[in-house]
Amino acid sequence: MKIAKAMLTERFQLSQPVRQESLSSQVYGILKDAVFTGKFKPGETLRELHLAKMFDVSQATIREALVQLEHAGLVIRLQNRKTTVTSLTPEDVRDRLEMRIVLEDLAFRKAAARMSGKDLADLRELSDAIQSAIDAGSYPETTAADMRFHHFVWEKSGSPALEKNLDQLTTPLFAFLGVLHAHGMADLRVTKSHEKLVEALASRDDATISAAVKEHITGSYGAFLQSGVKSLEALAPVETAGA
């Protein structure tokens, strides 16, 4: 299944392998997209040698890209160099959601104290972009717009450490919303408007912000948590990249 090479050609419209600097960053971006779009599924094995042949780059370049994926929480790398796409269990999801509520609550309250009128206007535009993607039925763009919205707030918190921890904590959650969507599990972003978060931030009231954040996050994975499925991997047939 030569996903990576096909994505390379399609994304960059190239007939030849990429020959620019920062190859590993480009490969990382393509592999990350493959996870977010479900082309690489939870539990799937990513083999360095096969990926190197697909991209026509060195194994060292692939290894650097996989390390970046590991830092983003999208893959798990073992000592024997085996790398698999992260597969969350219900317990993993609950744990991440509990931590996300605490950290995102803090980030939103800190951001509210720092955001200008222009910042709030920019955030409303990001909220509108999420709704436009939902209305257009574009699931990848919905997730991308959703991430842009939250990253904007995290950055405005003024805490790089908080922003980094939230990014590492939530990236796998965002990535695997597509897996749940593909199996008909409800996506509450359709009914939970991000505009309510903007209004809460504009109020600059800590209690209002905390309540809005908790309501927004709670239940996002409700269908998965109540399904009895043991892991995201169980929802997606596993294939081996490059096999």
Image (cartoon, rainbow, N blue to C red):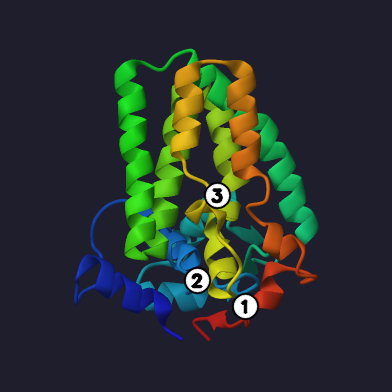
Mark 1 to mark 3 CA distance (whole Å): 19 Å
- In this view of the protein, which residue sits in the foreground, 1 or 106? 106
For label 3, the SS is: helix
Q: Decide: marks 1, 2 in contact (CB < 8 A)? A: yes
Q: Where 134 falls versus 242 (above or below)? A: above
Q: Decide: marks 1, 3 in contact (CB < 8 A)? A: no
Q: Amino acid at mark 2?
A: Gly
Of pointers 3 and 2, the one earlier in the residue sequence: 2
The residue identified by callout 1 is: 236
Q: Which mark is residue 171?
A: 3
Query: Quadrant of the rendered structure where residue 14 is?
Result: bottom left
Residue 162 is at least partly visible in this image: yes
The residue identified by callout 2 is: 38
Mark 1 to mark 2 CA distance (whole Å): 9 Å
Q: Is residue 94 left or right of residue 138?
A: right
Residue at (49, 30) in percent of width and height: 154
Q: Amino acid at mark 3?
A: Thr
Q: Residue furthest top?
A: 113
Name the spot of residue 183 as percent of width and height, x first.
Answer: 59, 75
Residue at (64, 62) in percent of width and height: 86
Residue at (77, 60) in percent of width and height: 90
Label 2 crowd bin: few (<14), some (14–19), many (20+), radius 10 Å: some
Name the spot of residue 68 as percent of width and height, x first.
Answer: 51, 51
